[in-house]
């Protein structure tokens, strides 16, 4: 009996400890992630295997589908969408690039998108260190590119962004649920 | 009879705390390994997810709320490994972070700190810009290092690019922290960067150069 009482008291103490632990910043529900071009640059560089210098890095948070209808409901059509979660998605170019015939100077840009049923208009904007698209200002746009949606057979639970090589440079691929787009970037 | 009453009393109390704890958990903590989908057709979610800390705290949210008088000072980018029952700090190879060996202060990519204003750390002027931040843990102190080698994975340190090193005393962290955490706090002359994992905590004072 005494052992039981002691163990229950211990449980109470353990519970209190867990409650107190929540004071430190918790892990985000939509965790942040990083993609680079060349793909996996940091890892390659430390192994001396990077074939090209670092050209682009994107920082974005990854919302989850969680059984929700994403496009047309959670992400409304024809409205500016944050292209991620939490802080604005940010792309950094380490050299000048060209997107849709527009020259993009090296530096950091925020990324947004306007989804419709069959395309996403991807936007690069100069406003940095903001939250979501709540303070989005079209006057600070650098480029807008309409990219067609490719329907994917496999459903992505988490929003994703990755780069791959192309003949003229590289491609930014982004998708969620069954929708995917590709943005060509020329060097 | 008395023991039975104590038993029931303990049980009720425990249930009460358990409920409170359950609510807190829903709001605040997520066990990443349990909730994150491990398979994505393109890019898997990291087991040690990336996170961002700001000074002023939650700067982008404050800006969104219309608090435009705040001046952005610092942004920290780091990945958050979990304790998962492991021994984190120690002086032998059973510890994940061995005393005397450089540790990336995170996971995956090197942790990165951006200063948007000039600051003073450990008496040294630090120009605004981007730096890698890492640490050499010891039993009684952590040596915190800022380095100019950027965009690397883990630690492949070029010590020639070290900008400065500062020894900071370790403090006990109770209750223990499951997910490695770095965040900024206000300080009279600037801010502190608190780094906490397992049962250890260190605070780096950052003075604003005005």
Image (cartoon, coloured by chain):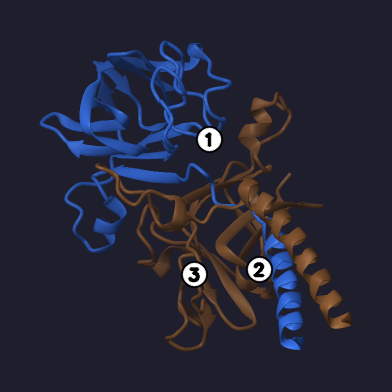
Q: Is residue B100 visible?
A: yes
Q: Measure the alpha-carbon separation of dots 3 and 2.
A: 21 Å
Q: Colour of chain A?
A: blue
Left/right placement of residue B145 relative to residue B193 reads left
Looking at the image, which is closer to me, A65 or B69? A65
Q: Are marks 3 and 2 on the same chain?
A: yes
Of circles 1 and 3, the one toward us is 3
Secondary structure of the residue carrying tag 1 is loop
Pointer 3 residue: B84
Judging from the image, mark 2 belongs to the subunit labelled B
Q: Which chain is brown?
A: B
**Looking at the image, do the residues carrying marks 3 and 2 touch, with CB atoms under 8 Å apart?**
no
Q: Measure the alpha-carbon separation of dots 1 and 2.
A: 27 Å
Which residue of the protein is positioned furthest toward the right in this rendering?
A: B2
Pointer 2 residue: B202
Looking at the image, which is closer to me, B208 or A21? A21
Mark before the other along the chain sequence, 3 or 2: 3
Q: Measure the alpha-carbon separation of dots 1 and 3.
A: 28 Å
Q: Position of residue B199 (x, y in %)?
A: 64, 74
Secondary structure of the residue carrying tag 2 is strand
Judging from the image, mark 1 belongs to the subunit labelled A
Q: Quadrant of residue B143?
A: bottom right
Secondary structure of the residue carrying tag 3 is loop
Pointer 1 residue: A87
């Amino acid at each position: 009996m005494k052992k039981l009482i002691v163990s229950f008291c211990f449980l109470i103490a353990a519970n209190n400890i867990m409650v107190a632990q929540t004071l430190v910043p918790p892990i985000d529900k939509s965790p942040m992630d990083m993609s680079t071009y060349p793909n996996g640059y940091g890892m390659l560089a430390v192994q001396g295997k990077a074939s090209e210098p670092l050209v682009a890095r994107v920082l974005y948070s990854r919302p989850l589908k969680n059984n929700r209808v994403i496009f047309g409901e959670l992400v409304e059509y024809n409205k500016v969408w944050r292209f991620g979660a939490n802080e604005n998605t940010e792309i950094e170019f380490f050299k000048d690039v060209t997107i849709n015939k527009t020259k993009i100077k090296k530096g950091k840009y925020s990324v947004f998108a306007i989804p419709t049923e069959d395309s996403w208009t991807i936007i690069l904007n100069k406003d940095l260190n903001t939250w979501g698209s709540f303070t989005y200002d079209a006057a600070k746009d650098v480029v807008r590119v309409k990219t067609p949606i490719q329907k994917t057979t496999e459903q992505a639970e988490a929003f994703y962004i990755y780069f791959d090589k192309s003949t003229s440079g590289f491609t930014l691929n982004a998708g969620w649920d069954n929708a995917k787009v590709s943005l060509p970037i020329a060097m | 009879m008395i023991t039975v009453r104590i038993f029931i009393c303990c049980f009720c109390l425990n249930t009460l705390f358990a409920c409170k704890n359950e609510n807190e958990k829903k709001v605040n903590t997520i066990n990443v390994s349990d909730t994150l989908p491990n398979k994505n057709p393109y890019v898997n979610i990291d087991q040690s997810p990336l996170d961002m800390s700001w000074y002023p705290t939650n700067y982008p949210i404050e800006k969104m709320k219309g608090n435009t008088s705040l001046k952005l000072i610092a942004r920290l980018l780091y990945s958050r490994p979990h304790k998962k029952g492991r021994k984190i700090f120690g002086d032998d190879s059973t510890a994940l972070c061995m005393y005397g060996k450089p540790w990336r202060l995170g996971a995956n990519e090197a942790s990165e700190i951006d200063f948007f204003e000039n600051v003073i750390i450990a008496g040294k002027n630090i120009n605004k810009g981007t730096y890698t931040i890492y640490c050499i843990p010891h039993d009684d102190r952590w040596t915190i290092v800022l380095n100019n080698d950027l965009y690397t994975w883990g630690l492949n340190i070029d010590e020639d690019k070290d900008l400065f090193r500062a020894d900071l005393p370790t403090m006990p962290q109770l209750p223990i922290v499951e997910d490695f955490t770095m965040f900024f706090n206000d300080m009279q002359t600037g801010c502190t960067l608190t780094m906490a994992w397992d049962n250890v905590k260190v605070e780096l004072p950052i003075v604003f150069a005005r």
